[in-house]
Image (spheres, rainbow, N blue to C red):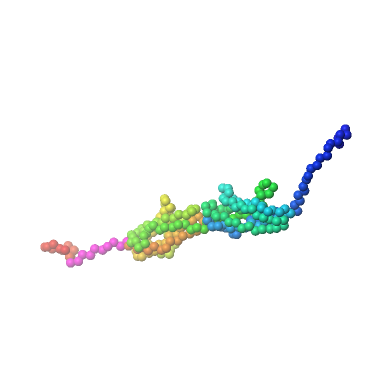
Amino acid sequence: RDAAGNVSAPAQITVRRFHIDGELTGSVLPATAEVARGATLDATVALVNGTTQDHAALPLRIRALGASGTLDTHAANVALAPGGSLSHPFAFATVGWPLGGVTLELAVFLDEDWEVLHSATVAIVDREPPLLTPLAPANGALSRTPVALRAFASDDDAVASVAASIDGGAWLPLAAMEAGQWQGETAPADGPHQVRFRAVDAAGNETVSAPIAFTVDTTPPQIVVSGLADGGLYGEAVQ
């Protein structure tokens, strides 16, 4: 009714009251704090439905986020009754992932949007030792001094150093050359020796070669003349 006494026709609308007496909570739990690059990253999602709403097929998403963006995504629909809870395992293959921290972000799709519930960080680490191939000296080689020491080394990340040890002695650093080669030299005493090479990558992983045997000989051959006297005079050819 308005001020002039006009009365409108009756109008009816229907409303619904939706009451939630709690909240939906969740967490993402990595199996380990560190994962070797290339290995499987195992984790579990734990969800608790503290509401009165029944989620027959709740969209669930876990993203693996690196410094450059999303590395991988796991998605599933889960059933979660009022007051219920669940545990949902999942795994990511980390082949080709960069080293460093990766964030596992847990989200569920509610009210037409993704809602982030929890996140956890896992470190992707390098546990793969470098590849090492000795080049010189060859096994069984006979050499004068200085003896050339050469090896080839490579790594998925970076080779930090290559060194050589003669007869179990101190590690002698080799110099980095082109195409993954490292070189140096040594001058041990005459006789048989062994050399081992060691390559270390940026993460501290190392590879040590099997011993390589070689012999040093710096003594020139001696010439011995017999049957003749120094300065002697002979009337016929001598042999």
Residue 79 can be seen, yes or no: yes
Q: Residue furthest left?
A: 235
Among all residues in the image, which is located at the extreme bottom? 227
In which quadrant of the rendered image does the N terminus lie? top right
- The percent position of residue 26, horizontal first and vertical second, equals 67, 55
Quadrant where the C terminus sits is bottom left
Question: Depth check: 236 or 193 in front?
Answer: 193
Does residue 39 appear left or right of residue 168 in this picture? right
Q: Residue at x 64, y 53 (%)?
A: 77
Question: Residue at the location (86% across, 34% down)?
Answer: 6
Is 103 rendered above or below residue 8?
below
Looking at the image, the residue that sits furthest to the front is: 9
Q: Is 212 within the magenta?
A: no
Say if 1 sits above or below 185 in the image.
above
Percent coordinates x, y for residue 135 in the rendering: 39, 57
Q: Position of residue 152 (x, y in %)?
A: 42, 55
Q: Report the span colored magenta.
A: 218-227
The answer to if 220 sits in the magenta stretch is: yes
Residue drawn where x is 63% and y is 57% of the image: 88
- Provide the major secondary structure of the magenta segment: loop
Name the residue located 33 percent from the left edge and 59 percent from the top edge: 144
Q: Which residue is nearer to you in this view: 78 or 122?
A: 78
In the displayed structure image, the side of residue 86 where residue 1 appears, left or right: right
Query: With 152 as the anchor, is 62 left or right in this view?
Result: right
Q: Is residue 204 visible?
A: no
Q: Position of residue 232 (x, y in %)?
A: 15, 63
